[in-house]
Amino acid sequence: LADEIKFSAVQSPIPLPKTRTPGDVIGILTGWGYPGMNSKVTDILQARTVSILTNKKCNDKNTNINDNQLCGFDGHATGFCT
């Protein structure tokens, strides 16, 4: 970062988990991505409920992720891979 982050009552670090996220659980995917095909990036935060998959299930879908990544999908057209 170009500037140091100044923490306050409304801005603080988020601790990272100490254990791996299990597969076959439900999560909420949020972001400012593309809300549809041929659309522009939205400036409104979007949220979608997704199934987080095991790495084996992700790799079975040819995503080729490693042990430090997550992937999942909503059963339709929305998915993610970190």
Image (cartoon, helix red, strand yellow):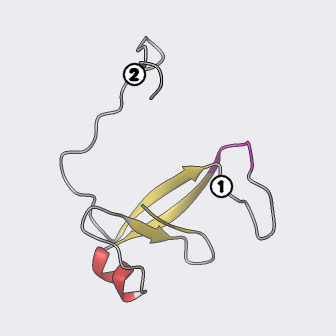
As for residue 45 lying within the magenta part, the answer is yes
Q: Residue furthest left?
A: 18
Mark 2 nearby-residue class (10 Å; few <14, some 14–19, many ≥20): few
What is the quadrant of residue 62 in the picture?
bottom left
Image point (40%, 15%), residue name: 7
Mark 1 nearby-residue class (10 Å; few <14, some 14–19, many ≥20): some
- Which residues are drawn in magenta? 42-46
Image point (65%, 49%), residue name: 32
Query: Which amino acid type is marked by label 1?
Result: Gly
Across and down, in percent, residue 68 comes to 27, 61
Q: Which residue in the structure is indicated by mark 1?
A: 33
User: Which is more toward the observer, 70 or 6?
Assistant: 6
What is the quadrant of residue 17 in the picture?
top left
Q: Is residue 27 left or right of residue 40?
A: left
In this rendering, the answer to whether 5 lies above or below 40 is above
> Which numbered disc covers residue 14?
none
Q: Which residue in the structure is indicated by mark 2?
A: 12
